[in-house]
Amino acid sequence: MRKIEKFFEKGKKKSVDFESNSKQFLDIFNDYELSDDEDSSPTDNGWLECEKELYSMASESICLVNFDRIIFEDKLGEGAYSDVFLGIYEDKKYAIKRMKESDDKRIQYARLQRELIALKRIQNVPNTVQVKGFCVRPFSCILLELVEGGSLDQVFEHNRYTFQEMLQISIKLAGTIQELHSMEPALIHRDISVQNVMISRKEAGMVPILGDFGISTVKSKMYENPANVIGHPRYRPPEITLKKTFGKKVDVYCFGSFLCELFSGRRVAEGLSDADVCRMRVQNEEIIIPSNVHPEITNLIKRCWALNPKERPNFSEIRQRLENISGTSCCLTSSAH
């Protein structure tokens, strides 16, 4: 029997409730020693240490969960590193993010750890997805709150939002990202898109919930590994594709694509391949914004898509501009009546 299986058997024999007592779970991990007859390799020890770090992240607010108790239902979505399912845990529905297996478990665990770190940081940030818990084995999963309204990419099937509703969604989302950027150190999402924004219908109206912090980073880590250019190529900021230093303005660039798709109800550069759109962005070629997008929104999108990050607005400016457009639109609507 391999060492990790023996470790888990040891925990079961001590009747540890890993969900409610993660400290006792970690104590067993810390006390666990390999016997001479067990196989051991530097690679195994490396991911075992990574796994230990993951267990240490469990807390009262983000607990360890038992994978065997998760009931997986419909598949809600798929990304490069994970699949998202509708699931049930302890009689409650969740969005369950299951990480895809990697040949190198250290990479797999590092992805899980990065997202958990981000999710712990945003627990007090309004309009961000909240985490219930996670498990590491036999599959790495994160249990997230289920936002019943679904994601905003439904606009491609049928645009059910009015112009004012889309403005309010955009204003609230800009405020949320502004708050992430004001954290110390700043949290940079890097994957803002209609697919990663859910809609929650509350008493205050429609509220956008920002999710998928899987490739988020902090401002202190300003350079992406050249061997690992990440993000969807259709929306990826050119400085990331070119492996240059990047900062908070990558979120501004992505927000421009978010606005384009939300207000047009069409994919950015519809009809072109992802590779062509990525090339156009790097070469600063014009990407046509559909004519059904309000002229003021079109101008804002173009500013967000500036090749030079310094020329892009920050989210305080973006929010103010959207509020001004909203106010003007309301006045025009009232005068028409």
Image (cartoon, rainbow, N blue to C red):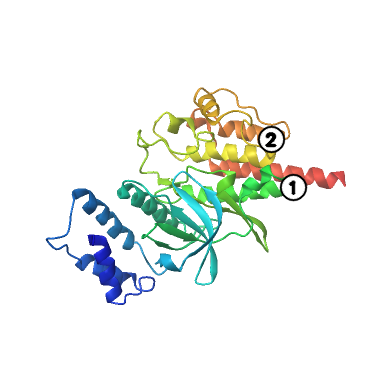
User: Residue 221: x percent and y percent?
Assistant: 36, 42
Q: Is residue 62 visible?
A: no
Relative side of 52 to 112, left or right: left
Q: Quadrant of residue 13?
A: bottom left
Look at the picture and state if 156 lies above or below 276.
Answer: below
User: Residue 85: x percent and y percent?
Assistant: 53, 56
Q: Is residue 35 visible?
A: yes
Relative side of 103 to 336, left or right: left
Q: Nearer the viewer, residue 71 or 123?
A: 71
Which mark is first along the chain, 1 or 2? 1
Q: Which residue is mark 2?
A: 296
Q: Amino acid at mark 1?
A: Thr
Q: How many marks?
A: 2
Q: Please tell me which residue is depicted at 70% across the width and 41% down the height of the picture.
A: 325
Mark number for residue 195?
Answer: none
Q: What is the distance, in whole Å, between disc 2 and disc 1 at their CAs?
A: 16 Å
Q: Please tell me which residue is depicted at 63% across the width and 48% down the height of the picture.
A: 152
Check disc 1 and report its element: helix, strand or loop: loop
Check disc 2 and report its element: helix, strand or loop: helix
Look at the picture and state if 69 lies above or below 74.
Answer: below
Q: Please tell me which residue is depicted at 31% across the width and 77% down the height of the picture.
A: 15
Look at the picture and state if 283 lies above or below 309.
Answer: above
Q: Nearer the viewer, residue 16 or 126?
A: 16
Q: Nearer the viewer, mark 2 or mark 1?
A: 1
Q: Residue furthest bottom?
A: 15
User: Residue 35: x percent and y percent?
Assistant: 14, 63
Relative side of 321 to 99, left or right: right
Mark number for residue 162?
Answer: 1
Q: Amino acid at mark 2?
A: Glu
For label 2, the crowd category at 10 Å Cα-Cα, with few meaning under 14, some 14 to 19 and many 20 or more, is few
User: Residue 261: x percent and y percent?
Assistant: 64, 39
Q: Residue furthest left?
A: 36
